[in-house]
């Protein structure tokens, strides 16, 4: 009996030792795993020859594996497997957001993951020039923000957007305010349009609208005329004079004969206009139809809008380019034809010099 008891005690002690050893091994493994996770996920890593932020565009619908591969290719992370493991440990695979990001060199996997979860996207500087048409704006946004240009143009006639904007028109052409914007890559076409129209409403103030109404003009008419002025003017100090020509012609019931309205309807513009272009049958053809066209032919800036509201007081009915950015203004058709011959001669001289 005594021998049996001794064997049992020895076995129990041995088991305890084994359990203790296993516990110590488990602790070591856990600690090692923790150090590994910290080293791979939390501690920053060095990226040589990378002082500037790294820009990465994460497309909508990208999988965790695709995002990890992209980050690895850009040098933001150093191991695809480690980044994927970090994201899975934090159960964040479905929380990573699309967008354009600027990553500083040396970020840990955890900080990279956190930035993607928070959607801390970077801005893209977008410069929309005065006088751009909606199609030109759509093309610009597609190049810089990857916005669907077809969707953008289509949304300009969206009834809900028109109602929300308070614009009394069947299209938002003319109401996309030209300016410098900072927009997030991945922003929707609808959101961009709302932002541009909001800037239009902010700049075309109630006081300006009041002055226009006092002169017998509504907002749509002013923006339409402003777009024509914008299409013609190169020098700021000529805007009000150009406006006066169109105001004078409207008062006399003359055709506006405004080239920007033709540029709007030709499919391959802007380009030098041909005689056949002036015969295109369209309500926008101001060489054929009297009065203003149905709507704006581009998106004018505030200087042209103000010029449309407040034209200079002149007797001019005609103007033609001089070839230096400015125009020659005339009261009579004969004066205008002489100025046009002078411009044609100047253009031929320039052409001959280029040929030599």
Image: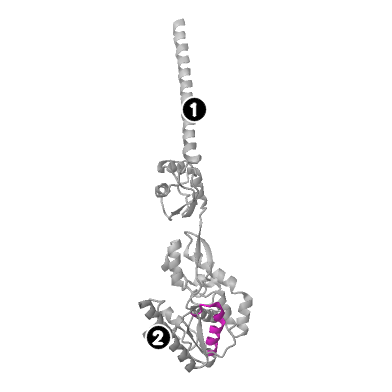
In the rendered image, the quadrant that contains the N terminus is top left
Query: Which of the 4 image quadrants contains residue 205?
Result: bottom right
**Residue 1 can be seen, yes or no:** no
How many other residues sit within 10 Å of disc 2, few (<14), some (14-19) or many (≥20)? some
Q: Residue at x 51, y 71 (%)?
A: 176
Q: Earlier in the sequence, mark 1 or mark 2?
A: 1
Residue 2 placed where, x, y %?
A: 46, 5
Residue 344 placed where, x, y %?
A: 42, 86
Q: Which residues are magenta?
A: 232-248
Query: Which of the 4 image quadrants contains residue 346?
Result: bottom left
Q: Looking at the image, which is closer to me, 65 or 159?
A: 65
Q: Which residue is mark 1?
A: 27
Residue 62 placed where, x, y %?
A: 41, 52
In this view, the mark in front (1 or 2): 2
How many other residues sit within 10 Å of disc 1, few (<14), some (14-19) or many (≥20)? few
**Residue 320 can be seen, yes or no:** yes
In the rendered image, the quadrant that contains the C terminus is bottom left
Cα separation between marks 1 and 2: 86 Å
Quick check: 199 above or below 8?
A: below
Q: Does the segment drawn in magenta span residue 34?
A: no
Q: Residue furthest top?
A: 2
Quick check: 49 above or below 35?
A: below
Q: Residue at x 40, y 86 (%)?
A: 278
Q: Which residue is mark 2?
A: 278
Q: Does the segment drawn in magenta span residue 238?
A: yes
Q: Residue furthest front?
A: 356
């Amino acid at each position: 009996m005594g021998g049996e008891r001794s064997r049992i005690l020895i076995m129990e002690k041995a088991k305890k030792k084994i359990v203790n050893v296993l516990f110590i091994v488990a602790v070591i493994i856990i600690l090692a795993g923790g150090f590994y996770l910290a080293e791979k996920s939390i501690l920053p890593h060095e990226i040589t020859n990378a002082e500037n932020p790294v820009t990465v565009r994460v497309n909508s619908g990208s999988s965790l594996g695709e995002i990890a591969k992209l980050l690895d290719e850009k040098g933001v992370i150093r191991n695809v497997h480690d980044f994927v493991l970090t994201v899975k440990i934090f159960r964040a695979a479905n929380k990573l957001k699309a967008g354009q990001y600027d990553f500083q060199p040396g970020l840990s996997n955890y900080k990279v993951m956190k930035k993607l979860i928070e959607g801390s996207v970077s801005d893209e500087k977008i410069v929309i020039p005065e006088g751009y048409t909606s199609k030109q704006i759509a093309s610009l946004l597609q190049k810089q923000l990857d916005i669907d240009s077809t969707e953008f143009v289509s949304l300009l006639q969206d009834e809900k957007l028109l109602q929300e904007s308070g614009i009394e028109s069947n299209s938002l052409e003319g109401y996309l305010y030209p300016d410098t914007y900072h927009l997030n890559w991945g922003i929707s076409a609808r959101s961009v349009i709302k932002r541009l129209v909001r800037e239009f409403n902010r700049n075309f103030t109630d006081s300006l609208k009041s002055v226009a109404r006092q002169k017998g003009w509504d907002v749509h008419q002013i923006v339409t005329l402003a777009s024509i002025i914008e299409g013609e003017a190169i020098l700021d100090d000529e805007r009000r004079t150009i406006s006066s020509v169109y105001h004078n012609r409207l008062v006399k019931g003359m055709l506006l004969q405004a080239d920007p309205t033709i540029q709007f309807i030709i499919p391959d513009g802007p380009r030098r206009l041909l005689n056949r272009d002036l015969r295109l049958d369209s309500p926008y053809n101001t060489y054929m139809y009297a009065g203003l066209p149905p709507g704006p032919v581009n998106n004018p800036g505030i200087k042209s809008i103000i010029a449309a509201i407040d034209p200079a007081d002149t007797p001019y009915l005609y103007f033609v380019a001089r070839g230096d950015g400015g125009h020659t203004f005339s009261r009579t058709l004969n004066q205008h034809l002489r100025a046009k011959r002078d411009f044609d001669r100047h253009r031929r001289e320039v052409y001959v010099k280029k040929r030599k």
